[in-house]
Amino acid sequence: MPQIFEVLMLLCFGASWPVAVRKAWKARTAKGASLPSVLLILLGYAMGIINKFVNGQITYVLAFYFFNFTIVGIYCLLLFRNIRLDQKRETRTV
């Protein structure tokens, strides 16, 4: 039963990330985004994954951690791209 609640928690946390990825892809700007916050979330998912392996709790729940980690990782890569695009735009206007 605790695994069901853990999956529900991961689904709740992960539900908005695909939308954020789409928005970041289309916006092509990092304005309003916080890279440190995203990196902290990524670290949190990594710690959850490590915890599962260390405690030998390798169950279907692990797939949800990996999915969320992957989606947040994609968002993080898009932020780096968008930061670079913002910098290019700033140098062109100067």
Image (tube, helix red, strand yellow):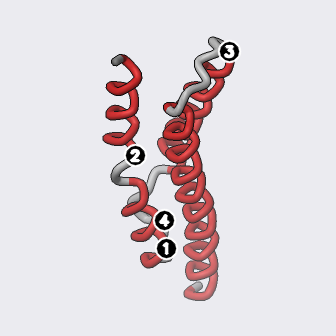
Which label's residue is closer to the chain start, 3 or 2? 2
Inspect the image, locate mark 2, and give the three-letter code of the amino acid beneath it.
Gly
Give the foreground label among 4 and 2: 2
Numbered disc 2: secondary structure:
helix
Which label's residue is closer to the chain start, 1 or 4? 1
Q: CA distance from mark 4 to mark 2?
A: 20 Å
Q: CA distance from mark 1 to mark 2?
A: 18 Å
Q: Quadrant of the N terminus?
A: top left
Give the foreground label among 4 and 3: 3
Q: Residues within 10 Å of mark 3 (few under 14, many from 20)?
A: few
Numbered disc 1: secondary structure:
helix
Q: Residues within 10 Å of mark 1 (few under 14, many from 20)?
A: some
Disc on res. 30 = 4
Q: Position of residue 11 (x, y in %)?
A: 36, 41
Q: Nearer the viewer, residue 62 or 78?
A: 62
Disc on res. 25 = 1
Position of residue 36 relative to residue 31, above or below, is: above
Q: Position of residue 2 (x, y in %)?
A: 36, 17
Q: Residue at x 43, y 65 (%)?
A: 31
Disc on res. 14 = 2
Disc on res. 63 = none
Inspect the image, locate mark 1, and give the three-letter code of the amino acid beneath it.
Trp
